[in-house]
Amino acid sequence: MRVKVKFFAVLRERVGASEITKEIADGSTVGDLWEALQREYPKLAPVKRALLYAVNRDYVGVSRVLKDQDEVAFVPPVSGG
Amino acid sequence: MRVKVKFFAVLRERVGASEITKEIADGSTVGDLWEALQREYPKLAPVKRALLYAVNRDYVGVSRVLKDQDEVAFVPPVSGG
Amino acid sequence: MFRVTQKALELQELVTFVNDPTAGAVATFIGTARDHNEGRKVISLEYEAYPEMAERELARLGEEAGRRWKIHRIAIVHRVGAVRIGEPSVIVAVSAAHRQDALEACRYAIEELKKTVPIWKKEFFEGGEVWIGTQSGQPLNLGDKA
Amino acid sequence: MFRVTQKALELQELVTFVNDPTAGAVATFIGTARDHNEGRKVISLEYEAYPEMAERELARLGEEAGRRWKIHRIAIVHRVGAVRIGEPSVIVAVSAAHRQDALEACRYAIEELKKTVPIWKKEFFEGGEVWIGTQSGQPLNLGDKA
């Protein structure tokens, strides 16, 4: 199945894209997707801290199971205001 | 000696004037002046509550001794805002 | 900027006055004439001030806020005369480098203004008019029925 | 009104939106681009958002404020793109019958916004640029040096 992945701010710059489409195995979690992305984009590999995850524009936990066509965002620490 | 007396809001309406000049004895306090005014303006006589006193635009205590040409104000409870 | 004025209050004027490049935060409070109070349907308000003293008290209040919090600038302007429903009667604007200082000083200024600054509100409601006493919104009671 | 926009923010627009004849109080907070941060001389700021989610989060925040305090209306607008020094990056406006509710809900909204709404600030300073991490004003540290 395929999901849409969105990157913002520092992650967007590291990946070099604001949005990609990614093929993943059925039953994959948000955490599985993140690990796959870390292998694919070496600059994501060292990121350890304070990421939040959103699926279809809601914050979710790392163990959330993804569905086909989900929109997934990896949210670095926010700094609005 | 003479002092200028200012009335505002409900007191102004009761006295029927916003400003008067009043002759008082040397050594009179703000409290003395207030008692004299209560005798002169019967509608002030029943006023018992929460008056503040100002001399020359500063809040003062009731025992403040007045000087010639002072500007005295009797301040009913404020309600700005 | 500490002012008692007959003119309609302009929020942006105060914000422009307090804002500066070294401030990151501006907090404002706008008191507006409300159409109801304590069960009465309010038609309009009228404010009276001891203007020279009120402006001095507003300035003191601003200085005290500056001693308590790290603020850049503060402006407090109160309108006098008739104020229509929905119109502002008072505006406080405070700038600071950090939001906590701006927010706390703004709250302090409006709270203190209501306690100490010689300004009085008369409420015109359906069926009468009344001077308001203190912050409670209750009609003024001087301890008598005159 | 919960909005993420490229356009310059207009304070009066928000205040007009939240104010109504039944409200007696409007509190606002304006975050502006400051010319210094953590010892760095800031030249300009740039904000990036996940706009659809940010607007949803702003709306949720407004609803939560409405559950916690007795407020009439709330508006939160955040700018994205380049923001020049002195210009507002975010405005919160809250109306209520009573000032405490307006002031507390306003403070709550700006505090929460900084914690949960997916918006990011990049600081352009003399000698470089940096993404800001969290409320501290510190450069973002993702646990690495990449």
Image (tube, coloured by chain):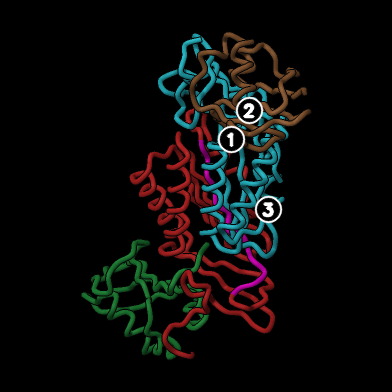
Chain colours: A brown, B green, C red, D cyan
- Looking at the image, which residue is at 56% across and 32% down? D32
C41 relative to C34, above or below? below
Q: Nearer the viewer, residue B52 or A24?
A: A24
Residue bearing mark 1: A61
**Which residue is the extreme one toward the front?**
A26
Q: CA distance from mark 1 to mark 2?
A: 8 Å
What are the residue bounds of the magenta stretch? Answer: C25-37
Residue A69 in the image, given as x and y percentages of width and height: 78, 28
Q: Is residue C76 left or right of residue D75?
A: left
Residue A34 in the image, given as x and y percentages of width and height: 61, 21
D104 relative to D13, above or below? below
Residue bearing mark 3: D18
Q: Nearer the viewer, mark 3 or mark 2?
A: 2
**Chain of the residue that carries numbered disc 2 in the rendered image:** A
Q: CA distance from mark 3 to mark 2?
A: 39 Å
Q: Is residue C27 magenta?
A: yes
Residue B52 in the image, given as x and y percentages of width and height: 36, 72
Q: Is residue D136 left or right of residue D118?
A: left
- Looking at the image, which residue is at 49% across and 68% down? B79
